[in-house]
Amino acid sequence: MLPAIDDVMALHEVDVAPIPEEHIDGNGHLSVRFIVEIAAHGAHELLVGCGLTNERRERTHQGVFTAEHHIAYIAEMRADSDLAVYVRVLDRSPRAVILLAFVVDRTRQRVAAVLRAVVVSVALDTRRSTPFAREIASEIDRLLSDHDALGWSPPFPRWGRLPGGRRRGWRRRWRRVLQM
């Protein structure tokens, strides 16, 4: 069950824009390619807001890799729509975070797509996972706490668990992802 549109729009708004005509596909709606790009950009911007900036990456040689994307297409976005992206933090382990990016059709006041991303902290010199820096983890945890207090659950419960995360124990299938 999707949360109410007002609940989604209470999240931090990452991006707002009309849909460029060149992003409309032959079916007359926003191309899947651009939905993924827009949602991933929203997740990226939330992490930049947590301190994962280009300057920090150059200075520390630490960054993030996306380990997984799952997307649910809920409603089409037509050329006359204004879109926005809202991002929610679902869980965090020492080395990874789960984010939900809601692509919203603001013109029709509905969720068009939901992207779930598992993002892993990496040491760029070794290309292996590493724990988030303390200040980054603290900011992600602050957002996680704020988002947990919203009073609504994620639309796809199985998407909200990160083995080894703040709320859950380790699972074997995730060890290889988190220990890259």
Image (cartoon, rainbow, N blue to C red):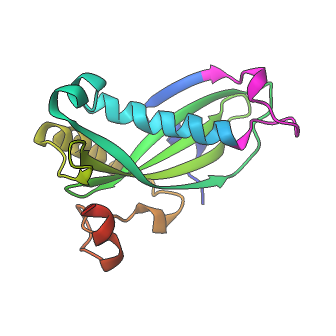
Q: Position of residue 150 (x, y in %)?
A: 38, 47
Frontmost residue, 157 versus 162:
162
Write the start and end of the magenta stretch as one range. Answer: 17-32
Displayed quadrant of residue 56: top left
Seen as rendered, the residue at the extreme front is 125
Name the residue at 27% across, 33% down: 50
Observer-nearest of 68 and 58: 58
> Is residue 84 toward the left or the right of residue 50 in the image?
right
Viewed as shown, does residue 98 lie left or right of 154?
A: left
Residue depicted at 72% across the width and 28% down the height: 107
The picture places residue 19, in percent across and down from the top left corner, at: 71, 24
Q: Predominant secondary structure in magenta? A: loop
Residue 79 visible (yes or no): yes
For the C terminus, the quadrant is: bottom left
Membership of 27 in magenta stretch: yes
Image height of 21 relative to 151, above or below: above
Can residue 115 be found in the magenta stretch? no
Dividing the picture into quadrants, the one containing residue 61 is: top left
Image coordinates of residue 151 in percent, x first then y, are 40, 52
- Visible residue check, residue 6: no
Residue occupying the far right of the picture: 27
